[in-house]
Amino acid sequence: MVSYHHYSWISKRATTVNASFKTKTNSIILHLAMDARGLKVYGESK
């Protein structure tokens, strides 16, 4: 789970989100899922 500063910073009407974060591995990120709890990263190992 990757935390974003606060989910309310992201507009509900936004079509794109620019977010920067560091991962523990260098694997390729295939999918990101975002909700009120943060970002979930699905990569090659998932």
Image (cartoon, grey):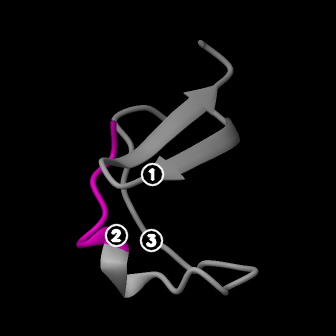
Per the image, the residue denoted by label 2 is 7
- The correct choice, above or below, for 8 with respect to 26 in the image is below
Q: What residue lies at 49% left-to-right and 73% top-to-bottom?
A: 19
Indicate left or right for 3 with 31 as reference. Answer: left
The one nearer the camera, 18 or 13, is 13
The image quadrant where one finds the N terminus is top left
The mark found on residue 16 in the picture is: none
Q: Residue furthest front?
A: 12
Indicate left or right for 1 with 46 as reference. Answer: left
Indicate left or right for 16 with 8 as reference. Answer: right
Comparing labels 3 and 2, the label whose residue is closer to the camera: 2
The mark found on residue 35 in the picture is: 1
Q: What residue lies at 68% left-to-right and 20% top-to-bottom?
A: 44
Magenta stretch: includes residue 4: yes
Estimate the x, y position of residue 12 in percent, counting from the top left. Answer: 57, 80
- Crowding at dot 1, Cα within 10 Å, few <14 / some 14-19 / many 20+, comes out as few
The one nearer the camera, 33 or 43, is 33
Per the image, the residue denoted by label 3 is 20
Magenta stretch: includes residue 16: no
Estimate the x, y position of residue 5 in percent, counting from the top left. Answer: 23, 72
Reading the chain from its start, which is encountered first: label 2 or label 1? 2
Range of residues picked out in magenta:
1-7
Indicate left or right for 36 with 6 as reference. Answer: right
User: How far is the residue under mark 1 from the one under mark 3?
Assistant: 16 Å
Element type at mark 2: helix
Report the amino acid beneath label 3.
Ser
Reading the chain from its start, which is encountered first: label 1 or label 3? 3
- Crowding at dot 3, Cα within 10 Å, few <14 / some 14-19 / many 20+, comes out as few
Report the amino acid beneath label 2.
Tyr
Q: Quadrant of residue 31?
A: top right
Circles 2 and 1: CB atoms closer than 8 Å: yes
